[in-house]
């Protein structure tokens, strides 16, 4: 791929076409562009770094395989990737729950063998606390909240990724945010906030 | 300025989500290397076109040996002319040959008979 610093960066789709045509530079740029996003999304969903790496790598493997057959203009590459990462992560979460003999769509209650949100927040790691709180949400709520409020995607794109309607996305994100706020607020006294008031 | 303790749970959550968006978790180098290795391993390879020399036929090789197409054409023309002259024996050629001392004989005995070798003069 020739370098042209003045031109706009090629789209993911254009890079995928170049990749399918054997351009080695396209492979490098696509990896650098997409792998961190796939990994970050998988980690938000799974809260486990090793599993997130496995899921992101598998999702990208599927992308490399379908590159020659990619139908241009039908979907954005990132939308497709988020969808595959979400599906793979959901499969892993279900497998986890089966192993723990828990119901699939459990209410937002802390899992007994996961690090408690309280403990994490006492360690003053707010990002880890957010991650722990996210882990307590039902899978679909977590996916919608992460895509909307952390990945910053628009509701129609989230609807495509999750294969649901836009209204369902709005409902999931609203309920997810309320649950997150409640989870975090419920531990305020454990953080010492009550003492400061 | 509001501190964490002054914020409502919703505002605190929004602040956390904004921070999370600004600070995405970073994958390590080994993961990136594995993904790139996958990409390279599965990348379609375009067929490499190697220029193969055209296979030359018998006549082409013969022409090259004799000095090219022009030489072959000249040789062919000379051979045809020889055949025509030999068979037709055109009158101008016969008279021309006679005028310069090459008479045209009706027959030419290249292998004499044995009779002369068996004559008594030679045996004695």
Image (spheres, rainbow, N blue to C red):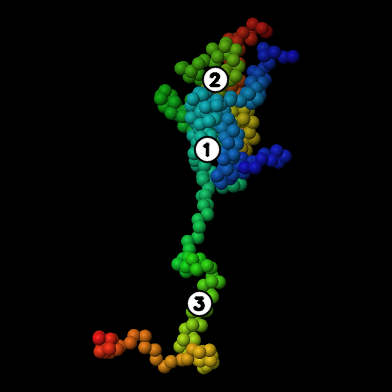
Q: Nearer the viewer, mark 2 or mark 1?
A: 1
Instruction: Name the mark on residue A86.
Output: none
Image vertical order of residue A168 relative to residue B77, above or below: above
Mark 2 Cα-neighbour bin, 10 Å: few <14, some 14–19, many ≥20: many
Q: Are marks 3 and 1 on the same chain?
A: yes
- Measuring from the top left, give residue B65's x and y in whole percent: 49, 66
Residue A134 in view of the camera = yes
Please, what secondary structure does the residue beneath circle 3 have?
helix
Image vertical order of residue A197 relative to residue B101, above or below: above
Badge 3: chain ID:
B
Closer to the N terminus: mark 3 or mark 1?
1
Question: Mark 2 to mark 1: distance in Å?
Answer: 33 Å
Please, what secondary structure does the residue beneath circle 1 have?
helix
Residue beneath the point at 58% across and 45% down: A17
Residue beneath the point at 55% across and 44% down: A22
Indicate the quadrant containing the C terminus of chain A: top left, top right, bottom left or bottom right: top right
Badge 1: chain ID:
B
Question: Mark 3 to mark 1: distance in Å?
Answer: 63 Å
Question: Mark 3 to mark 2: distance in Å?
Answer: 96 Å
Please, what secondary structure does the residue beneath circle 2 have?
helix
- Measuring from the top left, give residue B17's x and y in whole percent: 63, 23
Q: Determine whether label 3 and label 1 are within 8 Å by CB.
A: no
Instruction: Name the mark on residue B39.
Output: 1
Q: Which residue is mark 2?
A: A132
Image vertical order of residue B50 relative to residue A5, above or below: below
- Measuring from the top left, give residue A27's x and y in whole percent: 56, 38
Instruction: Name the mark on residue B76.
Output: 3
């Amino acid at each position: 791929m020739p370098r042209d610093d003045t031109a706009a960066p090629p789209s993911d789709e254009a890079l995928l076409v170049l990749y399918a045509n054997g351009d080695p530079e396209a492979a490098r740029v696509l990896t650098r562009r997409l792998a961190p996003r796939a990994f970050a999304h998988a980690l938000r969903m799974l809260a486990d770094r090793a599993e997130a790496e496995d899921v992101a790598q598998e999702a990208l493997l599927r992308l490399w395989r379908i590159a020659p057959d990619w139908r241009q203009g039908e979907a954005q590459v990132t939308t497709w990737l988020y969808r595959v990462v979400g599906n793979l992560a959901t499969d892993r979460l279900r497998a986890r729950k089966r192993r723990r003999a828990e119901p699939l769509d459990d209410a937002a209650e802390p899992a007994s063998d996961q690090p408690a949100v309280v403990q994490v927040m006492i360690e003053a790691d707010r990002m880890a606390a957010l991650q722990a709180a996210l882990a307590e949400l039902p899978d679909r709520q977590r996916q919608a909240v992460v895509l909307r409020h952390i990945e910053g995607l628009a509701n129609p794109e989230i609807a495509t990724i999750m294969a649901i309607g836009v209204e369902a996305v709005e409902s999931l994100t609203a309920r997810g945010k309320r649950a997150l706020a409640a989870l975090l607020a419920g531990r305020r006294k454990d953080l010492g906030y009550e003492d400061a008031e | 300025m509001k501190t964490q303790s002054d914020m409502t749970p919703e505002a605190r959550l929004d602040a956390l989500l904004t921070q999370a968006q600004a600070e995405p978790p970073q994958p390590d180098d080994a993961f990136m290397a594995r993904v790139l290795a996958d990409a390279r391993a599965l990348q379609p390879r375009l067929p490499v076109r190697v220029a193969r020399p055209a296979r030359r036929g018998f006549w082409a090789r013969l022409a090259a040996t004799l000095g090219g197409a022009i030489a072959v054409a000249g040789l062919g023309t000379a051979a045809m002319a020889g055949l025509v002259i030999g068979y037709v024996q055109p009158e101008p050629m016969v008279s021309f040959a006679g005028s310069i001392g090459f008479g045209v004989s009706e027959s030419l005995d290249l292998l004499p008979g044995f009779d002369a070798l068996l004559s008594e003069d030679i045996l004695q």
